[in-house]
Image: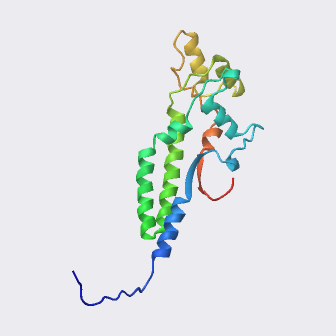
Amino acid sequence: MKFGGSADVIVTEDKVPALLKAIQSLTNKRVMVGIPAEHAERPDSEVTNALIGYVLETGAPERNLPARPFLVPGVRNCTEDAMARLKKAGISALSGNMSDVDNQLNAIGLVAASSVKDKMDTGPFTPLADATLEARVRRNNGSQVGAAEELASRRAGNPPGTSLAQPLIDTGNLQNSITYVIRDNRERH
C-alpha cells in the first residue's frame, strides 16, 4: 500500500518540556503529616511534642504506657479523599497547571492533619490510668475537664472511659502541633 503526497508538521509552540517539568515536579513531591521539628517544642518542658507523639503512637511498655495510635489511623481515615485530590493534581500537572497541583497537595495536607486531630479527639483509646487522672487534676487545681469526673465515676464503680477525660488531650499543645509540610524527595533531611 502506498500513500501519496507529503505532510509537513510545523511546531509553533513546544509544550513538551513544560509538561515533563510539571510531571517531574509532582512526582518529586510528598506530603508529610505529623509534628515537624519546627513545631515540636513545648513551652513547659524539655520533652518535645514529637517525642510525646511517638510514645503515644507506639506505647512504652517499660513505662506502663499503652500504644494509643492516632497519626497512622488518622491519615488512613482520609486516604480516599487524598487519592481523589492526588488524581486532580496529576491531571493538573498534565495540563501544566502547577498552581493547582500545589493547591491540591496543600489540600491533602490540611485534610490529613485535620483527620489526625479528629482521631485524637474521638479515639477510641485505652483509658487513662487513675494516677494520670489524679496528676491532671492536681496540676490544674482540679479544673482538668473530665479528669475529676472520670475519677469520681470510677470510684463509684463505673468502668473506665465513661467521661470526657481524653487520653491524648491534656493541654492541647500536642494536638496544636500536628501539621503538614510538602517536601521535595530530592531534598536531604
Count of marks placed on residues: 0
Q: Nearer the viewer, residue 58 or 151?
A: 58
> Which residue ends up furthest to the bottom in the rendered image?
5
- Residue at image coords 56%, 58%: 29
- Residue 1 sits in which quadrant? bottom left
> Which residue ends up furthest to the top in the rendered image?
157
> Which residue ends up furthest to the left in the rendered image?
1
> Which residue ends up furthest to the right in the rendered image?
46
- Residue at image coords 71%, 27%: 139
**Above or below — where is 86 with respect to 142?**
below
Position of residue 81 in the picture relative to residue 152 (left or right): left
- Residue 138 sits in which quadrant? top right
**Above or below — where is 30 with respect to 157?**
below
Residue 129 x, y percent position in the rendering:
63, 19
**Above or below — where is 178 with respect to 86?**
above
Position of residue 13 in the picture relative to residue 42 (left or right): left
Q: Nearer the viewer, residue 172 or 81?
A: 81
Q: How is the image coloured?
A: rainbow
Residue 92 x, y percent position in the rendering:
43, 65
- Residue at image coords 63%, 59%: 186
Residue 19 x, y percent position in the rendering:
47, 71
Q: Nearer the viewer, residue 126 or 173?
A: 126
